[in-house]
Image: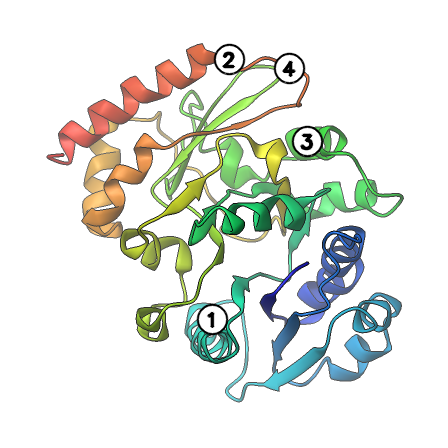
Amino acid sequence: MANLCISNLVYGNVYTHIFLNYHLKSVLENITEETNFNNSVYFIFTDGGNLDQIKAHENFIKLSTFIPMSFFVIQGGLNYQGRYHFQKVQMQHTVKYALEHHLLMHISCADMFYGPRFFTNALHYFSLGHEAIIVQPARVAFESAAPLLSGAALSADALFEVAFNNLHPLWTSANWDNPYFTNIPYHLIWSDEKSICFRGFSLSPLIVVPQEWMLSASGCADMSFLPNLKNQYFSEDWTEMPCIELQQLMSFYPPFSRKCANTGTLAQWAKKSIPPDNYANLNRYMMFKKSTDPINHELITQSQIVVDSILVELGK
């Protein structure tokens, strides 16, 4: 049984559309006798312009029968450019409520889509004493992937196929072998024809036990939480808790440079953009593949060699 405070920031026409037709659909597909959300709450932070649209949607109405849904209107003009400021407002309110009501906390996003048993498998690790689960959603192009997600619920392997065949340019340019390597290398990937080995400075603590220090954390939990967590579960197998982010093609565009990857250049970027406590995150990896396919250990080894070089450049 879930005991969650789920929180989301939903604004603008496109994000509202994704939230209603895909995000909420995937939450509904995760409701089982084992994970029924009876003891949970769902907070929606918005500028108020989409309230009527959300309340009238069949997925919202259906989910409301399983979990109480509450709205919080944020003044100040919600927009993509200012999202981190509003995420901090969302974070502070959610942490406070979760602490007061002894709930686990899940800061979600409007374009998050969950695969089968995501919540059931994630919550299992809190019963083992972990204070956070670290899982990286695959970054997928919304425009091409969305039609493939509109029908019946997909298996984890089928969702992987959708993700791998519709990767967002932010990730295709993050491939270490791409001649037009990313100019924002928070994430790095290595791949073969069946799988992806992911590493990143930025890792996603998707569900956490709320703590007092989180009240003053930034809106970017993937950067601000991890150095302060003590007993996390890092998933190395994406199919264990499958999830994707349905990101618009315009997001982060253009994500690529006109140069190949270079450990020295990347290290110089990291010194300006990444808190030193997050450098060691690169030593973690996660494999994206079908459950029936073997792990390509060569990708893990190749990526670790690159990471070791980057960390030397960073003085670690």
Q: Nearer the viewer, residue 220 or 233?
A: 233
The reply to whether callout 3 and callout 4 are in contact (CB within 8 Å) is no
Determine whether the residue tagged by mark 3 lies in a helix, strand or loop.
Answer: helix
Q: Are marks 2 and 4 in contact (CB under 8 Å)?
A: no
- Is 230 placed left or right of 203 in the picture? left
Q: Nearer the viewer, residue 58 or 176?
A: 58
Tell me which label, 2 or 1, sits earlier in the chain: 1
Rounded to the nearest whole Å, what is the CA distance between mark 2 and mark 1?
37 Å
Residue annotated with mark 4: 293
Q: Amino acid at mark 1?
A: Gln
- Front position among marks 2 and 1: 2
User: At which x and y percent is residue 84?
Assistant: 43, 68
Give the residue pinned by disc 3.
160
Foreground disc of the pair 3, 4: 4
The disc labelled 2 sits on which kind of residue?
A: Asn
Gap between marks 1 and 4 measured at Cα: 37 Å
Real-space Cα separation, disc 3 to disc 4, in angstroms: 12 Å
Amino acid at pointer 3: Phe
- Give the residue number, with chain letter if any, for mark 1: 87
- Residue at 57% over, 33% down: 238
Residue labelled with disc 2: 296
